[in-house]
Structures are given as C-alpha cells and as structure tokens.
Amino acid sequence: MQVTPDLNIFPISWKNADSCSYNQQNYLHVFKLNLDNLGQFTESLVSFLSLEEKVKATSYSNLKDKNSSIIRWAVTRLLIAKYCRVLPEKLCFITGKNGKPQLVPDKTYPPLFFNLSFSGNYALIAVSNKETGIDLEQVKPDFNYWEVLDFVFSPEEKNRILNSSDPLASFYCFFTRKEAIVKALGTGIHDQMPGISILDFDLTLPVDYQEEFESLQLISFKVTQKHIAALAFCSNIESLEFYEVDQHWLASAFQ
C-alpha cells in the first residue's frame, strides 16, 4: 500500500516490549503482535485463559482463527497483569455495553483501560489509564470499498477519498479512524458514523458525545505496508509509546 501524502500518517518507531515501563501515569502503550511468529506458544498460552475465553477459542472451526484468539487474549492478560502486578490468570474481564471488553476493577489495581484489534496475521493491543480505541485493517486490493462509502462517510469525506491519488488507501485510513473513535467512545454509534468528522484530524462528534469526549485525539499509523491502523485517545496523555511483543518477550512469561 502506498500511503498518499495527504493522509497525515503518524511516524512511529517500534520498541521491544522488554523495554516497557508499566508504572507510568497518563500513558498510552500500543503493543504489536505478529500472530504467525508467536504460534509456537499457543498450547502453553491456553493455561492463562479463563474458561469463557477457552470456550470462545474452541468455537472457531478454523485452526488459525482458534490459535489467533488464544494468543491475543493470553498476551492481553500477560500485559495487563504487569500493570496490575498480579498473576495473569487472576484477572477478570467483563463485556461492557456494546461489546467493549473491560477489566473488572479491584481496589488494588490502577485505573486501566484497554482495547484490541486484529486483522490478518497482526494484532494490536492498546493499554492506558484513560479510555482509548484502536482499529487495525489489512488492506485488501479487491475490496469494493465504494459500496460502503455512503454508510460510513460524509459527502466531503467521500469526495476526499474518491479524488485521492490512492482511493483505496484513503478509504482504509479514514475507516480505521472512525472505527477507533467508535471503540474509544464505547457507545455503539456505528449508525452515526457519517456524523463523525475525521478530515485533517479536526474531530467532530455527534452532539450527544461532544461534551464528554471533547478532548479526544486521533492518529493514523502504518503497522506494515499492508496494514493501516488508527488510535483514538485523550489529549492529556503524556507518554505515547509503541512496542512489539516478540518471541523472546513471550518466552520470558514462562520463566
């Protein structure tokens, strides 16, 4: 995917997850997982999952989808456990309204919010002490994106996409921005997506959410040449870092 200059892609540098500090304030950490590279740990990672998560994983008929589910949720547990300073299997999660997963609060835990997204063989996990939303999409060259433009974008956004030097890249970039915002809000307002303006990051939200989320910020970034992502977060974040969970980091979880 060739990213056009007008898309304002945020330059990032991936650090090794070993260098992450888990005791910061006003932070937002994004973790990248190459699911194919971590597949060797699948069987061992099952032990970290709850019964519900195990059942969900076994519901997939496709082995690759099953393993992906196990890796994503086990690594999520391992990461959040480091922030909360507990064993990963001790954590409890609930599904909030509109399907957004949440950590069951405990008086010993710091304020913590997280969000996940995956597409193809990559997954992203965002962890913060503030509400956040993240979306990742693998660019599919044969996707008929023009069929959904009217359902997702305003006339101005649609015009910007169609007149871009790379309409497909523009579609995915703008789409992930809207998805990240919806996930950050956790309000299930997909039917109002045309009313969420994301052009040039000058955000406009539906009236009902403008006061509560007036400080929301947004960035787009590349994960690979074929994967585009967007991140929505609160403006008072002081530390924004990007990390990669590799085989070495995951192997250390069993030591």
Image (cartoon, rainbow, N blue to C red):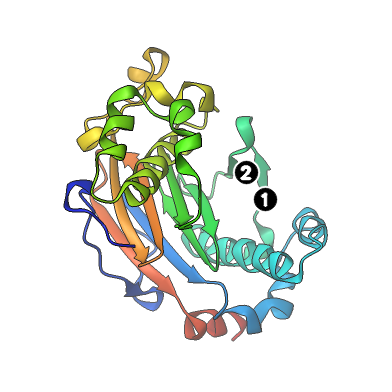
Quarter of the image where one finds residue 228 = bottom left
Callout 2 amino acid: Val
Q: Is residue 19 above or below residue 232?
A: below
User: Badge 2 local density, few (<14 within 10 Å), some, or many (20+)?
Assistant: few
Q: Which residue is mark 1?
A: 92
Say which quadrant the N terminus sits in: bottom left
Q: Is residue 50 above or below residue 96?
A: below
Q: Which mark is residue 104?
A: 2
Badge 1 marks a residue whose secondary structure is loop
- In percent of width and height, residue 51 lies at 81, 58
Q: Are marks 1 and 2 in contact (CB under 8 Å)?
A: yes
Q: Is residue 132 among what the camera can see?
A: yes
- In percent of width and height, residue 78 lies at 57, 67
Residue ID at (50%, 48%):
115
User: Badge 1 local density, few (<14 within 10 Å), some, or many (20+)?
Assistant: few
Quarter of the image where one finds residue 146 = top left
How far apart are the alpha carbons under marks 1 and 2? 5 Å
- Which of these two is toward me, 102 or 166? 166
Say which quadrant the C terminus sits in: bottom right
